[in-house]
Image (cartoon, rainbow, N blue to C red):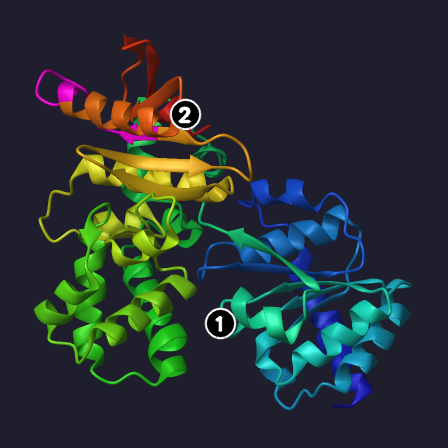
């Protein structure tokens, strides 16, 4: 592309860097206090705020070296044009050590440039919604020269900041029913959520993997969104929806996970083989989506709370399983190599379910030799000592902040 054209694009895109009046600092910024030469990938579901984080990072590091490849004027951009972009960055800002690229996957062969730039001690920060930017593929394209940072819809704390609310039962109930997608929260229009799911399926799944029988696959997605927190069987899904093979169902669910629409949680076991042959539990990228796609018309608030807790554990970087022995426990989790934690989620603990909830948590605690466990509820706070082990009941609004 012509140098003057690229310069014009870069100058006009600077207008985007002006802070939006509704913009709030995202929690992920804490992870980017320094940016040594490397490739940093902001990955996650569409419309979760990756571009906003990119903008905030640029202001934090006092850089305006930004280029967005979704701009229609960039059609025809080739790998060789990156060097011209670097030169223009240097001309306009006086430095070209840190570059911020939005939707870079639109450039065929972009990874060759990134590898070269890192070798020249440049720092590259990348965003992209397209499944081409999956970490498993980057592992071969960038040969270990990148770090991934997952971006999720708003956490409860960010939700409070965005809507200028205070922590408490009322705002937490709103959060677990409305979810955290900025576009939906700013408009209140349900069409934002339905369009989002459609975009993910069409652009990141169906087109990318050339899937036929899209009506059947769409029905599977609706079923999964309506059954978050429940165990699913690949074979049962194959039979229920008359899909050709179990492997096709497995592939499709992996595609959904890659696109950050749905996630599969394995059953806890020290044996990976045992984990692999047991059913998974399914969770969604946003509890607002679960609420929107509830087929009953009155969603199970306990499931919404459970999905909310799962997402917060993911935001914090925990590895997550569910536990099932004689009884069940919703989450076994661990951060890095630290000690395991056992978490049960229940909207309300009362005489009807107290025995079940405590026994499931207690069994998981004994299995992992834990001295204490947690039951996250909507609004209850208490401490229970059973068989020498301590169980804390914590309201979701306190746990999630």
Q: Earlier in the sequence, mark 2 or mark 1?
A: 1
Alpha-carbon neighbours of circle 2 within 10 Å: few (<14), some, or many (≥20)? few
Magenta segment: does it hold 22?
A: no
Point out residue 44 in the picture as x, y percentages from the top left corner.
49, 58
Vertical relation: 159 (above or below) 205: above
Magenta extent? 343-355
Q: How many numbered tags mark residues here? A: 2
The percent position of residue 320, horizontal first and vertical second, equals: 40, 43
Q: Report helix, strand or loop for mark 1.
A: loop
| Location of residue 224 with respect to 339 vertically, above or below | below
Q: Is residue 392 above or below residue 278?
A: above
Tell me which residue sits at (32%, 52%) in the image. Answer: 275
State whether the magenta stretch is mostly helix, strand or loop: loop
- For mark 1, what is the residue? 130
| Left or right: 264 as drawn, with respect to 258 | left
Circle 1 packing at 10 Å, graded few (<14), some (14-19), many (20+), is many
Q: Residue drawn at (65%, 40%), measured in percent from left and top?
A: 30
At x 27%, y 16%, the residue is: 380
Front residue of 153 and 340: 340
Q: Position of residue 366 (x, y in %)?
A: 32, 24
Q: Is residue 7 left or right of residue 150?
A: right
Asked if residue 350 is among those painted magenta in the image, a careful observer would answer yes
Image quadrant of residue 201? bottom left
Q: Distance between the Cα atoms at labels 2 and 1?
A: 33 Å
The residue that mark 2 highlights is: 399
| Quarter location, residue 197 | bottom left
Image x and y of residue 63, in percent = 79, 56
Which part of the image, by quadrant, shows the N terminus? bottom right
């Amino acid at each position: 592309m012509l140098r003057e054209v690229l310069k014009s694009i870069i100058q006009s895109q600077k207008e985007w860097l002006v802070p939006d009046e509704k913009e709030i600092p995202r929690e992920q910024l804490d992870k980017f206090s320094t940016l040594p030469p490397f490739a940093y990938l902001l990955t996650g579901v569409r419309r979760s705020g990756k571009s906003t984080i990119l903008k905030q990072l640029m202001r934090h590091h006092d850089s305006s070296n930004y280029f967005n490849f979704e701009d229609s004027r960039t059609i025809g951009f080739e790998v060789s044009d990156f060097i011209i972009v670097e030169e223009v960055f240097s001309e306009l800002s006086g430095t070209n050590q840190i570059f911020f690229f939005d939707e870079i996957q639109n450039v065929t062969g972009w990874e060759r440039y990134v590898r070269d730039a890192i070798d020249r001690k440049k720092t590259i920060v990348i965003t992209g919604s397209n499944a081409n930017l999956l970490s498993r593929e980057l592992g071969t394209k960038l040969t270990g020269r990148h770090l991934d940072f997952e971006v999720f819809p708003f956490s409860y704390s960010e939700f409070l900041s965005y809507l200028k609310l205070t922590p408490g039962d009322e705002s937490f109930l709103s959060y677990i029913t409305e979810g955290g997608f900025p576009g939906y929260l700013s408009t209140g229009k349900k069409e934002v959520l339905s369009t989002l799911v459609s975009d993910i399926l069409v652009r990141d799944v169906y087109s990318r993997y050339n899937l036929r029988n899209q009506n059947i696959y769409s029905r599977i997605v609706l079923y999964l969104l309506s059954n978050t927190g429940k165990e699913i069987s690949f074979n049962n899904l194959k039979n229920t929806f008359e899909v050709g093979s179990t492997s096709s169902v497995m592939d499709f669910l992996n595609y959904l996970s890659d696109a950050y629409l749905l996630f599969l949680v394995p059953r806890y076991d020290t044996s990976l083989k045992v984990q692999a042959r047991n059913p998974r539990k399914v969770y969604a990228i946003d509890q607002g989506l679960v609420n929107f796609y509830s087929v009953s018309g009155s969603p199970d608030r306990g499931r919404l709370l459970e999905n909310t807790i799962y997402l917060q554990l993911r935001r914090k970087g925990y590895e997550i399983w569910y536990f099932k022995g004689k009884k069940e426990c919703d989450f076994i989790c661990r951060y890095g190599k630290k000690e395991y934690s056992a978490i049960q989620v229940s909207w309300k603990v009362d005489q009807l379910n107290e025995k079940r909830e405590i026994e499931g948590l207690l069994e998981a605690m004994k299995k992992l030799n834990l001295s204490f466990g947690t039951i996250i509820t909507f609004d209850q706070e208490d401490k229970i000592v059973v068989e020498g082990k301590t169980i804390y009941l914590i309201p979701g609004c306190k746990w999630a902040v």
